[in-house]
Image: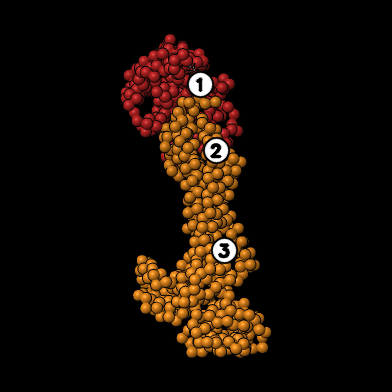
């Protein structure tokens, strides 16, 4: 593996609360994620998976330790740079859908481009493109609340990839779906990873999904207990 | 996010909770509606007053009166007689006496620095007026002030230089005097019945030169020129001692209208020192205007109070909106939306509430105002030609909308700051 480092966590600790109620969600985690790699973060509920993902996505600051993006310490970045980074480089699939139910599917997918300040015609064109990628272009005008669970998850993925990100963070992307829909979503994500070289960081309970990743990181009580690298097949 | 997208998003967010939004807009509507109406009333009346001052035209005239013995409250104290001051007791004003002016006073006023000319304001007692074979009507005459410009229904304004007796009659006299319309009165002869000092009644005749519209300032009397005034007075004072006519309630003096306000104040204080009080036509009407302005200001105050109450509605609406959209705010922040844009998004929503509320409010006020104008001006203010009770200028309506939007922005900034400060992680974990 010679690809450059995309994200690196060094001895990252995250605690919540103070005094008696002090709780250590992450107790010193170090990982190095390479560009184009697909990484699964697995572990029991409450083991700190989402916490780690939020830290890697620069949505939160660690209590101690460092996060580096493309070799640069994230703590040194200004708010404006952080916002630009998250807007242009990252795509998010959160544990909940976070869709605006009363707005159209198209409006929901457009949001990251709207934030980026992309013009109207351009962003509509790209939204249709992203929706076509998840095979939902025919639902562009429907209200988001009228979709099925699997369709909603596909809308969320379209929203994550519309900005042409280099890293996609996905928290339980198949958590609430039946197995066949789950497989569809999985295929979508790994397609993006293999065809477009997008780095994939997936939080999951699902062993099948984890199996398909280049690397599996097992978390337990805020610590990495096992890291399994899949043998290169090519 | 582009500003245009922020505005569009703020506007559509506003309509997500339609009932809540409409209630808030109604509160703003009430404030803006009232403010537009009271403002319209103020500018309608003051425009009319300005026009009236323009009609009177006489910008170079000072009305001069002798300073009274007692200007305070009516008092029972008996005053000493002063042989140098002629006084008239005014029953209607209690025991207050005012000092009348005599020819000596007029001469004295003429000598004061800055006074170009001074004339006594003459009065005549007319028993009745009539024209042709019409019935006799009570009429009061007032001397025409050179330079005054009345709104005329027909004919032209009289001149004091005229060598023949001339009269300007109000429109209200047209049909009683037996004329079919204003035009047919022009050039006709009119008679004035006067009783002289010996108790005999006789008539003086004059030509009707013009017909004036009714107005707020001196529209009800018959305006007559100097020539007619002299004739009437000569008849009235026949048989009386010559000194009786030498008594005037006030005098009109002319000054250079181009002098500065300070110079005018100096001139007035010179008159005060000499024992006379003086007022320009504008001073007289200005005090009336000050009263109107005061009333309008109080009414505006009520409207502003209504708007303040509405602004709490805005704060409340937006706090609820921020609460409801916690997750959305978190998502937008996670996707790289800056805190300042989040602030703009929510304060923009407040400004939009203010915009729609005040737009609908002022449009409704203009609609209601023009209905009120039509009703009032066709009924009890019918005679005041040129009056528009409520006047709305695009500039004043625009500034009201601007003010309301400003208030809404201030009200919205508290919830907007709260939204901007939200931590994306907390917002994303929010249930
Ligand atoms: N803001 C917070 N304050 C206090 N404790 C927190 C906070 N956020 C997370 N935690 C705690 O940190 C621990 C890790 O949470 P996290 O969400 O990372 O779990 P997870 O591994 O993603 O679990 P799941 O699979 O159920 O999503 C949990 O015990 C949680 O209660
Ligand atoms: Mg989680």
Q: Residue at x 52, y 61 (%)?
A: B291
In the image, residue B32 sits, relative to residue A217, either above or below, namely below
Q: What SS does tag 2 mark? A: helix
* Residue at numbered disc 2: B316
Q: Residue at x 45, y 81 (%)?
A: B103
Q: Which quadrant holds the N terminus of chain B?
A: top left
Is label 1 in a helix, a strand or a loop?
Answer: loop
The chain shown in orange is which? B
> In the image, residue B192 lies at what x, y percent?
60, 86
Q: Is residue A140 visible?
A: no
3 vs 2, front mark: 3
Q: Identify whether B75 is placed above or below B228.
A: above
**Circle 3 marks a residue in which chain?**
B
Along the viewing direction, whichever of B315 and A174 lies nearer the viewer:
B315
Disc on res. B389: 3
Mark 3 or mark 2: whose residue is earlier in sequence: 2
Residue at 63% x, 83% y is B128
Q: Give the number of the disc on residue A172.
A: 1
Q: Position of residue A15 (x, y in %)?
A: 43, 17
**Image quadrant for the C terminus of chain B?**
top right
Q: Nearer the viewer, mark 2 or mark 1?
A: 2
- Give the CA distance from mark 3 to mark 2: 37 Å
Q: Is residue B382 left or right of residue A96?
A: right
Whole-percent x and y of residue B245?
A: 51, 83
Report whether mark 3 lies on the same chain as mark 2.
Answer: yes
Tell me the tag on residue A35: none
* Residue B150 in view in this figure: yes
Respond yes or no on whether mark 1 lies under 8 Å from ligand 2: yes
Distance Cα–Cα, label 2 vs label 1: 36 Å
* Residue most extreme to the top: A225
Residue B192 vertical placement versus B337 (above, below) = below
């Amino acid at each position: 593996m010679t690809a450059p480092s995309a994200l690196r966590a060094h001895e990252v600790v995250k605690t919540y609360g103070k005094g008696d109620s002090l709780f250590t969600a992450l107790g010193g985690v170090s990982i190095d994620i390479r560009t184009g790699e697909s990484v699964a973060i697995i572990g029991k509920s409450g083991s700190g998976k989402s916490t780690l993902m939020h830290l890697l996505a620069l949505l939160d600051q660690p209590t101690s330790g460092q996060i580096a993006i493309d070799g640069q310490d994230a703590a040194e970045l200004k708010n404006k740079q952080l916002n630009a980074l998250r807007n242009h480089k990252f795509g998010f699939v959160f544990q909940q859908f976070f869709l605006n139910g009363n707005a159209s599917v198209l409006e929901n997918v457009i949001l990251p481009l709207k934030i980026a300040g992309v013009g109207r015609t351009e962003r509509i064109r790209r939204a249709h493109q992203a929706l076509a990628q998840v095979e939902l272009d025919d639902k562009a005008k429907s209200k988001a609340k009228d979709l099925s669970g699997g369709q909603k998850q596909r809308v969320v993925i379209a929203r994550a990839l519309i900005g042409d990100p280099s890293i996609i963070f996905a928290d339980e992307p198949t958590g609430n779906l039946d197995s066949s829909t789950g497989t569809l979503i999985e295929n979508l994500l790994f397609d993006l990873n293999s065809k477009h070289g997008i780095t994939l960081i997936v939080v999951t309970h699902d062993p099948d999904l984890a199996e398909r990743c280049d690397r599996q990181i097992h978390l337990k009580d805020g610590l990495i207990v096992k890291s399994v690298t899949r043998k290169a097949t090519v | 996010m582009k500003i245009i997208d922020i505005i569009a998003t703020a506007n559509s967010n506003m309509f997500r909770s339609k009932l809540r939004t409409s209630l808030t807009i109604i509160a703003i509507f009430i404030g803006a509606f009232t403010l537009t109406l009271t403002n319209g009333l103020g500018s309608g009346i003051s425009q009319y007053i300005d026009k009236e001052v323009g009609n009177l035209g006489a910008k170079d005239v000072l009305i001069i009166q002798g300073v009274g013995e007692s200007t305070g409250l009516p008092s029972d104290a008996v005053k000493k007689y002063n042989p140098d001051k002629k006084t008239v007791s005014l029953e209607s004003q209690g025991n207050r006496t005012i000092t009348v002016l005599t020819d000596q006073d007029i001469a004295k006023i003429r000598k004061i620095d800055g006074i170009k000319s001074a004339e006594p304001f003459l009065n005549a007692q007319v028993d009745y007026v009539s024209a042709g074979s019409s019935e006799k009507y009570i009429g009061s005459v007032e001397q025409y002030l050179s330079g005054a410009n009345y709104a005329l229904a027909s004919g032209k304004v009289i001149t004091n230089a005229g060598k023949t007796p001339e009269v300007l009659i109000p429109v209200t006299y047209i049909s009683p005097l037996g004329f079919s319309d204003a035009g047919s009165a022009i050039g006709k002869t009119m008679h004035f019945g006067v009783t002289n000092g010996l108790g005999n009644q006789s008539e003086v005749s004059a030509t009707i030169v013009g017909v004036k519209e009714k107005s707020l300032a001196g529209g009800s009397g018959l305006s007559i020129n100097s020539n007619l005034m002299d004739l009437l007075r000569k008849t009235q004072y026949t048989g009386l001692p010559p000194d009786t006519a030498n008594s005037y309630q006030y005098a009109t003096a002319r000054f250079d209208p181009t002098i500065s306000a300070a110079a005018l104040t100096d001139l007035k204080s010179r008159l005060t020192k000499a024992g006379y009080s003086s007022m320009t036509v504008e001073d007289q009407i200005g005090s009336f205007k000050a009263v109107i302005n005061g009333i309008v200001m109080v009414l505006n105050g009520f409207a502003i109070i209504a708007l303040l109450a509405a602004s709490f509605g805005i704060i409340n609406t937006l706090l609820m909106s921020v609460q409801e959209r916690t997750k959305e705010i978190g998502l937008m922040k996670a996707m790289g939306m800056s805190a300042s844009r989040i602030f703009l998004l929510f304060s923009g929503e407040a400004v939009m509430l203010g915009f729609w509320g005040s737009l609908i409010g002022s449009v409704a006020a203009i609609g209601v105002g023009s209905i009120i104008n039509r009703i009032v001006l066709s009924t009890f203010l019918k005679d005041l030609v040129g009056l528009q009770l409520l006047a709305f200028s695009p500039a004043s309506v625009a500034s009201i909308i601007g003010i309301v939007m400003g208030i809404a922005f201030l009200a919205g900034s508290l919830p907007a700051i709260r939204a901007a400060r939200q931590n994306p992680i907390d917002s994303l974990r929010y249930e």
